[in-house]
Image (spheres, helix red, strand yellow):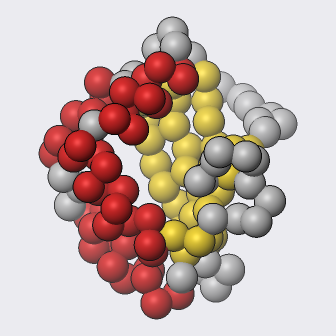
Amino acid sequence: MQRHGQLIGIGAEAIAEYKKLHAKVWPQVLEMITACNIRNYSIFLKEPENLMFSYFEYVGKDFEADMAKMAADPVTQDWWAINKPLQRPLDTRGEGEWWAEMEEVFHHD
């Protein structure tokens, strides 16, 4: 299992809409997340900085292939098209990243 932490900004004016959307995530999107071997997925919001932190556990064997599978899914693409304009990617994110990947520096079970 791999643990992933990611960070992204959100516009202050978009927070209410983002919360509304995520209170009722489309079932097909949730099914794709599961089909791509992602478990224990959460998104946290920190105001007033308007930063969102996501955490998930990847239980598959080929992360890149599973993420490509998710990105190719038409329903997921529609979901992202609605959500991406609400998000504010960090200027310091890595090449090809939307949500900035974070290094895990400590873990305790």
**Furthest-bottom residue in this view:** 13
Please report the residue visible at 28 percent of the width from the left and 73 percent of the height from the top: 20
Please report the residue visible at 55 percent of the width from the left and 75 percent of the height from the top: 10
In the image, residue 107 sits, relative to residue 27, either above or below, namely above
Out of 13 and 97, give the one closest to the viewer.
97
In the image, residue 63 sits, relative to residue 14, either above or below, namely above
Would residue 27 be seen by someone viewing this image from the given angle?
A: yes
In the image, residue 100 sits, relative to residue 109, either above or below, namely below
Q: How many marks on residues?
A: 0
Please report the residue visible at 77 percent of the width from the left and 36 percent of the height from the top: 104
Out of 8 and 91, give the one closest to the viewer.
91
Q: Is residue 32 left or right of residue 101?
A: left
Out of 16 and 84, give the one closest to the viewer.
84
The percent position of residue 88, horizontal first and vertical second, equals: 59, 71
Q: Quadrant of residue 52?
A: bottom right
Q: Is residue 37 left or right of residue 79?
A: right
Quadrant where the N terminus is found in the figure: top right
Quadrant where the C terminus is found in the figure: top right
The percent position of residue 107, horizontal first and vertical second, equals: 74, 31
**Furthest-right residue in this view:** 105
The percent position of residue 37, horizontal first and vertical second, equals: 40, 22
The percent position of residue 70, horizontal first and vertical second, equals: 36, 34
**Furthest-top residue in this view:** 61
Q: Is residue 28 left or right of residue 12?
A: left
Please report the residue visible at 46 percent of the width from the left and 48 percent of the height from the top: 42
Q: Quadrant of residue 8?
A: bottom right
Would residue 59 be seen by someone viewing this image from the given angle?
A: no
